[in-house]
Image (cartoon, helix red, strand yellow):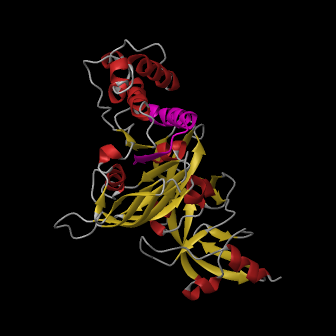
Amino acid sequence: MFLNVANLSITYPGAVAPAVDNVTLGLRAGDIGVLIGPSGCGKTTLLRAVAGLERVSSGTIAIEREAVSKPGLHVPAEQRRIGMVFQDYALFPHLDLAGNVGFGIHHLPKSERASRVAEVLALVGLQGMEARFPHELSGGQQQRVALARALAPRPRLLLLDEPFSNLDVDLRERLAHEVRGILKAAGATALFVTHDQLEAFAIGDVIGVMHQGKLHQWDDAYALYHRPATRFVAEFIGHGVFTPARLSMQGNDVVVHTPLGALHDLEECPLPSAYEGGLCDVLLRADDIVHDDASPVKAQIVRKAFRGSEFLYTLQLTTGDVLMTHVPSHHNHEVGEWIGIRPEVDHVVTFARDAGATATPAPANAILVSAAGP
């Protein structure tokens, strides 16, 4: 692994709990890793430790197999050959773009420095703008200048701390896609911190979900959404709710009994014996619930959020159970209205009833194979 973080903990003096608690992750050369989680989860502290701005309490950080942080060893930040991009851009207002981007490569001869500045400005789509000043640029352009400045010295690792948080919501996801393209074109290895899931999905090859200092899962976006490692990841990623369910057997098939009705023909599901009495909580995503006027199951709209091409409806069944669903925006129903819904689920993620955030789901694939027989 290009970046290897092993059993890392960081505890501040006087703190009750560690800010980073026994975290292990690896990042391959050329990949973009993202740390995501609620405020105070430890993601920025972890990023600062990789940068050399925080000392570790235990564990090791290694870059290209060279230990840079561990108890008794702390390679200073300026010796780690790491570039950083911050949320406030930190551009010098009195310098033009050539001066800003070339700030970290003054050791190069003037002609070589000018060539490198032009090269990275072209990489970020700002070619020919060396003489412009930061105040003449949009927020998105300023962020790309900050990225060009960080790339100019050819760092072996690039760290980005919530770089889009000062930008308009509509611009963030688009710029995340642009930045991913820039980093891939530069062959850069990067670690990115954000609280925005759409940014994380847009830019990351691998994404880590943190909560209360712990790394719950380090995986690709598809796995986080469809194969969450803990109940916290299941709740934090995407839109969905847990609803009480009971598992039973019909022949060699498992049936999941929910307030929405029975779920049959599932590709993946644990056996009822995974839980006492087969009782569990099942995760139902918004895309597991389909609006269908002909369905006998009705739900009342208690909240709606317009997302352009669709609404995100929060629904309540007659049982009091709450569900969520994505509905095309031409189905513009009012809050309080009852609509027909049906489940469209091919696999379920289940947890013990009322389990805590660190609870893991019951395994599915191997269990179904054993249920069906050879």
- Work out whether residue 205 or residue 316 is closer to the camera in this orientation and state it: 205
Residue 276 vs 258, above or below: the answer is below
Residue 172 belongs to magenta span: yes
Residue 87 vs 273, above or below: the answer is above
Point out the image quarter for the C terminus. Answer: bottom right
Magenta: main secondary structure equals helix
Residue drawn where x is 44% and y is 33% of the image: 151
Residue 40 x %, y %: 30, 57
Direction from residue 296 to residue 34 in the image, left or right: left
- Work out whether residue 29 or residue 66 is closer to the camera in this orientation and state it: 66
Direction from residue 319 to residue 94 in the image, left or right: left
Which portion, as a residue range, is magenta?
170-196
Q: Residue furthest left?
A: 14
Residue 358 x %, y %: 43, 72
Residue 291 x %, y %: 63, 51
Residue drawn where x is 49% and y is 50% of the image: 33
- Work out whether residue 302 or residue 257 is closer to the camera in this orientation and state it: 257
Direction from residue 250 to residue 176 in the image, left or right: left
Residue drawn where x is 75% and y is 78% of the image: 369
Residue drawn where x is 28% and y is 18% of the image: 95
